[in-house]
Image (tube, rainbow, N blue to C red):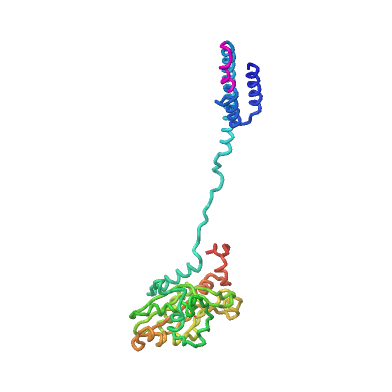
Amino acid sequence: MKEQLEKIYKSACEELKNVNSTSEIDELRNKYLSRKGELNEIKKNLKNLSDEDKRIIGSLANEISEKLSNELKIKFDEFYTKELNEKLVKDRIDITLPGKFTREGKVHPITSTTDEIVSILQGLGFSVVPAIHSPEVETEYYNFDMLNFPPDHPAKDMQDTFYTTVAPNVILRSQTSGAQIHAMEGKNPPIRVISPGRVYRNEEVNARKNNFFHQIEGLYVDKGVTFGDLKGVLNEFIRIYFGSSRPTRFRSSYFPFTEPSAEVDVQCIMCEGKGCRTCSGTGWLEVLGAGMVDPNVLKGVGIDPDVYSGFAFGMGVERLAMLKYAIDDIRLFFNDDERFLNQF
Ligand code: PHE
């Protein structure tokens, strides 16, 4: 037994020489000194020995446990300090490292242009209709019929419209003009409202046209409203929006829901009127349609055209943004290129 004890001690010392970490020392302590450890196993067998041997072997076993446990402690302290120092070096906070930045979001140029146009028009006395009166998923009734498009009129497919599968007459609106009807239904003039929103057209996409875009509809109905009032509002809007004089022209046009009708073109900023890809060689970009509200439209919503008159306009937000910021392709607004969006 004595030999056995010495052998245990020797092999423990041998193993202790090769340890490399505090956790390995803990393992050793378990193996040799714990309740189920090798030394304890021997102590358990002491009861079978003579009193004399019990005393000798017992005290030898205690001596070895004590020695071993001291040696383990010394080694443990050594590794503990070493490991702690390593950890402190590794975990040190380097205050010279650059911080983690959260990138700031930006307002999309279509949103900021819409906000700007809306605030100019508010300054001219218009208020924004509630969103519920300006739905993107619309019925033909509001988008066409009530706007004086006869059921079989070719103008109905003049704007190639996206039809839905919800019901045969439910469409993605092709213009914000339906908001005029929502604004007038069941109400008495004076009505002076605007309605910004997205519209959809089944068109071939190019530098000037996308198959969805944004419009701002305007409507003013009251006693004695004239075409002169319409021109005055639009000229004032253009003057404020562009901040300086920009060559602009009114062109006569046709819309089923206005009579007379006009379109407003602003000189192309990319070529200054010389003609380029953006304006398809014309030197001008159309930014809005407008006109005096057709008496039939007023009658349809129960407003007497002999008492009241009105004007309406619909502006193209993308076109107005392109002309202000010299953007040569409408598709840039929609392809989420951060190099473009970060400039605003
Ligand atoms: N809704 C017409 C369009 O999208 C524009 C317009 C609005 C014309 C109001 C006249 C009056 O082209």
Q: Main secondary structure of the magenta part?
A: helix
Q: Is-magenta flag for residue 249?
A: no
Query: Which residue is pictured at 48% across the width and 67% down the height?
Result: 111
Q: Nearer the viewer, residue 324 or 315?
A: 315
Q: Nearer the viewer, residue 335 or 104?
A: 335
Find residue 120 and report its horizontal and vertical position in percent.
42, 72
Q: Is residue 253 above or below residue 243?
A: below
Q: Is-magenta flag for residue 43?
A: yes
Task: Indicate the quadrant containing the N terminus: top left, top right, bottom left or bottom right.
Answer: top right
Find residue 239 and report its horizontal and vertical position in percent.
46, 75
Find residue 298 and report its horizontal and vertical position in percent.
38, 85
Q: Which residues are magenta?
A: 41-51
Q: Is residue 191 above or below residue 114?
A: below
- Left or right, residue 88 beside residue 226: right
In this view of the protein, can residue 35 be seen by the observer?
A: yes
- Left or right, residue 302 beside residue 172: left
Query: Which residue is pictured at 57% across the width and 67% down the height?
Result: 335
Find residue 24 and report its horizontal and vertical position in percent.
61, 31
